[in-house]
Amino acid sequence: MYALLPAMGHASDEVLLQALQEMVELYRPNQAKLSRLFVWFGVLLRRSGTISAEEKRKVEERLQMYDNLLDEDPYLAFCNEG
């Protein structure tokens, strides 16, 4: 459900940032799943028409903190090769 939040109406940057923190806490043991959730979260965030550019920028900054997690995901690395 967390990954879908950016697509839901009235999702503020505060709500989205809280969701990111909760995902980190919940999925810390399963980093592969966490990285895939971040990918979907980011895709839906960028495509959202209900979130202001400023709010998107704030959330994107937080997501960028986890770029190394995405770089280390074996599945995403495989997808980038193909």
Image (cartoon, rainbow, N blue to C red):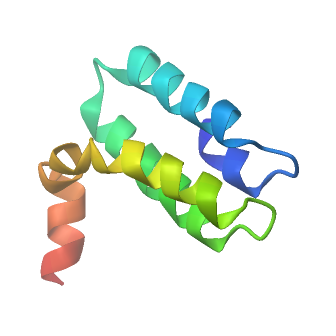
Q: How many marks?
A: 0
Residue extending farthest to the front is 54
The residue at 87%/46% (across/down) is 10
Question: For the C terminus, which image quadrant?
Answer: bottom left
The correct choice, above or below, for 81 with respect to 18 in the image is below
- Between residue 81 and residue 39, name the one nearer to us: 39
Residue extending farthest to the right is 9
Is residue 51 at least partly visible in the picture? Answer: yes
**What x and y, as percent, mark residue 24?**
39, 24
The residue at 54%/52% (across/down) is 41
**What x and y, as percent, mark residue 28?**
31, 20
Residue 27 quadrant: top left
Residue extending farthest to the bottom is 82
Is residue 36 at least partly visible in the picture? Answer: no
Please give left or right for residue 75 compared with residue 61 in the image.
left
**What x and y, as percent, mark residue 63?**
38, 47
Please give left or right for residue 14 compared with residue 31 in the image.
right
Please give left or right for residue 33 compared with residue 19 in the image.
left
**What x and y, as percent, mark residue 59?**
51, 47
- Between residue 42 and residue 57, name the one nearer to us: 57
Question: For the N terminus, which image quadrant?
Answer: top right
Please give left or right for residue 9 compared with residue 61 in the image.
right
The residue at 41%/15% (across/down) is 25
Residue 47 quadrant: bottom right
